Image: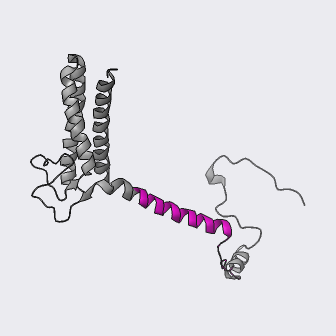
Amino acid sequence: MSAPEERKVRSVAELPAAIEPGRDLWPAIEARLQGPSQPLPAAVPGPLRRLRWVAAAAMVASVAVGVWIGRDLWPLPGAGMGSPTLTAQRPLSEGAAVNAAYVSDPRYRRERAQLLQSVQAQLKTMPAPTRAKVAASLAVIESAKKDLENALGKDPSNALLQELLINTYQDEMRVLTDVHEAGNTGRGI
């Protein structure tokens, strides 16, 4: 039996429209489909079982961390459009559609008030350029807080806005703490 002659194909039109396989493939495919199906394992193997427990533990830990992080900001029941209270216990700016009110930890409010008093006293003793930098930083943070509070008033369930607001509060505390510590040690800002 000689090998078929190979020739070069120069276009798709030169190819045959259909090529029959050397044997019929459908009986083998049908036998596999109708053959005995393999039963599912009765028990999950050890490593997979441990992986499931690890995944469940990770989910529980994630929920616990989320609750721990959000423990200081809770919507007040029955708080409506009347008088929202935010971390500094001041109402949102006009025009904010508020559905929920957020109250921060009293310890945070107390520490923030103390730091603000200390920084105000220290600002009077600082050189003018330093005073301008600190005041500008605090003004930017205050503006960001107002913007985020207004946005949260319109969309109180927006998790990204909530996180940004918390980060802004933390940034404000960092600036206030840095200014306070710099003034107490005499090292400057």
Q: Residue at x 13, y 61 (%)?
A: 80
Quarter of the image with the N terminus is: bottom right
- Look at 27% across and 33% down and name the residue there: 176
How are the residues colored? one colour
Q: Residue furthest front?
A: 184
- Residue 43 location in percent, x, y? 65, 77
Q: Residue furthest right?
A: 1
Taking the magenta stretch, the answer to whether it contains residue 106 is no
Residue 178 relative to residue 36: left or right: left
Q: Nearer the viewer, residue 70 or 47?
A: 70
Spot occupied by residue 187 in the image (x, y as percentages of width and height): 34, 20
Q: Relative to 127, does residue 93 appear above or below in the rendering?
A: below
**Residue at the (27%, 48%) spot, across then down:** 107
Extent of the magenta region: 36-65
Residue 65 appears anywhere in the view:
yes
Secondary structure mostly taken by the magenta-highlighted segment of the chain: helix
Taking the image as drawn, is residue 144 in sight? no
Q: Residue at x 66, y 79 (%)?
A: 42
In magenta segment, residue 60: yes
Which of the image's four quarters has the C terminus? top left
The residue closer to the viewer here, 82 or 151, is: 82
Residue 18, x across and y down, in percent = 66, 64
Left or right: 115 in relation to 19: left
Vertical order, 37 against 160 (above or below): below
* Residue 105: percent from left, percent from top: 27, 51
Compared to residue 132, the image places residue 72 above or below, namely below
Q: Is residue 50 left or right of residue 58?
A: right
Q: Nearer the viewer, residue 18 or 83?
A: 83
The quarter holding residue 20 reads bottom right
